[in-house]
Image (cartoon, rainbow, N blue to C red):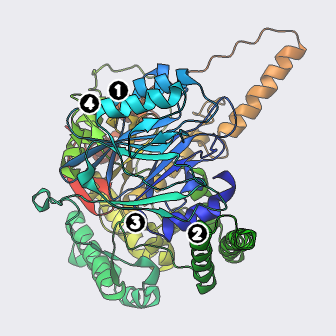
Amino acid sequence: MVNKLSELHQLLYVDDYDIVFVTESWLHDNITDGLLDPKSYFSILRKDRTKSRGGGVCVFVRKLWHVVPVTPATEFDDLEIICFDLIISNSHVRFFVLYRPPSYDETYMCNVIKYIRNYESTTYTNVIIGDINLPKIDWNSLTCTGDILHKQFLLFVIESGYCQLVDFPTHNENLLDVLLTTDTKFFSSIKPDIPFGSSDHTSVKFSMLFYKDYSSGQNTHASPSVYNWRMADYDAIESYLTQINWYNLVSLYPSASVLWDVFMAILLSCVDQFVPRINVSSKSSRGNSTKVSREIRKCLSKKRSLWKRLQTKRFDTAIHTKYRECCFNYKSLIQQHELRTEKRVIDANHLGYFYKFINQRIYDRSDVGVLVDTDNTVIVDNCEKANVFNTYFASVWQEDNNAIHRCENLNVTPIESISLEEGDVLYAIKKLKSNYTCGPDGLPAIFFKRLGSTLVVPLTVVFKQLLSVSYVPDVWKKAIITPVHKKGTATDCSNYRPISITCVCCKLLERIIVNKLHDHLSTNNILHQAQHGFTKGRSTLTNLLESVNDWTLCLQNKQQVDVVYIDFRKAFDVVSHKNCSLDCIHMAFKVSCWSGWNGYILEEPTAQKLVMHCLMKLTWSVV
């Protein structure tokens, strides 16, 4: 599959399968999940062979369905087998996907049987899919004339009550692949299909039937309507905003809170008038198949026709030659299609599009799927998932122990007040990233980037009014939380970290205050020379260069070098906000200037949203 990625993408995105099982995948660590599924439409489970080339199994399950991987014991690490549960409505099916190389002996087969016996379900349907390379089993009469390997596996199938559903040869005249199940009512329309790529192994295509439970409410949410910021009429918005006398608004609404509400009402009114709406659906839902050229569709039809003729005339060299040529031509057409896509990315001369295209193939952007709580209860409902994440994220936060550390007397004149000019606001706007992600106020960064010269005056007016009375709008204390998988099992909520998306206006004022604070600390020589993090002109790179230079000098002078690396677990979750606030008062700000922002830092968020799926946003709060 490594050299057939273009054809794999065609299979996933054009043929519109819900589940794709691959045996003998030949995958390895250098092939990321992003390369296999750049659009991130599928949940990918894989077991690669580690000790040699070849082998391996891989499963692609559309993210529309719930998947729970089963983690086996370490004694089965050498087996090329995957076990997972598929949950649709109230139906559970446990799948075993395996590959047994023809050269492996009876010890390997014994371990495979032991694996399945240990993890097969006693409460719901079990399904075994894969290539077992046992051609001497007669599945119609359940007899075999082969060696101990054939007898071992056939005896296991009979004793466990499995039924073989594949009744046609899958490799030449041999039946090597199995679709075994303990309940045949889920399956229909099992038939052979054209091989993947230029393989000589027939594909097995089948359908599964599930009863939909409408009372569960699964996948019944209407597609939400969102603003299409890419199609916004920014010229019309700019014309609308330039007609407003912002200084007159201050005299009409002297209260900082009222002025902020009026300012936001004006912006949202512009958005409603000049930004169109679109209905969005889950990217994993069916019906999102990729369109391909007519030439590719015709070549695929020709390949299918030649393959069917070859099944009836297996030894016809002319048909075989035409089939091989058609396979090569089909692969070439798909590769040319992907090359044209890559060329469009390059010709666009857009750095953001380029990195997005690359990152899709490097990183795995797995969404939140099924969760398993501490009681081994499977959680598929979005509301229940939000509660589980809420409980975990709140448990990570540690209460302040009220220990106050002593600060050295610096004899530094504090900042009496924060002076704010239009240049400061414009500089902060230019530093924003041009993305379309909206915060709790519903406005993305691109809105401020495109209208920076127009919004700089009202933002300066509003920010000055807020700072004059140390008022922090309530919406700034809210965030949209997205759980992002870090490592380990995706069903464990402790393997996720929360990403907070706050209001852009809040970010702008925060950047301005940070710049003022940094200038004050630098002017008074308060920052230590060894400080590289969160400092202008310095980074981890400058820290590393300075460290390497110091180590080199020590080694040249024949001195001992001791290096200690410290990584504080969840440092930002356990840091004392009270002490940080006291440091700001001690080193930079006058108490009267900092009092309002002190409450903003110490106050816990009370209303946040947890994004579980692109179709749903659930309200939660930190306990």
Which marked residue is nearer to the observer: mark 4 or mark 1? 1
Is label 3 in a helix, a strand or a loop? loop
Q: Which residue is mark 1?
A: 117
Q: Is residue 158 visible?
A: yes
Give the alpha-carbon distance from disc 4 to disc 2, as whole Å.
65 Å
| Badge 4 element | helix
Which residue is tagged 4? 395
Q: Which one is earlier in the sequence, the residue at label 4 or at label 3?
A: 3
Give the labeled residue for mark 3.
Answer: 283
Between the C-alphas of marks 3 and 1, the distance is 37 Å
Q: Mark 4 packing: few (<14 Cα in 10 Å), some, or many (20+)?
A: few
Q: Position of residue 82 (x, y in %)?
A: 45, 38
Q: Position of residue 562 (x, y in %)?
A: 70, 12
Q: Nearer the viewer, mark 3 or mark 1?
A: 1
Amino acid type, mark 3 = Lys
Q: CA distance from mark 2 to mark 1?
A: 39 Å
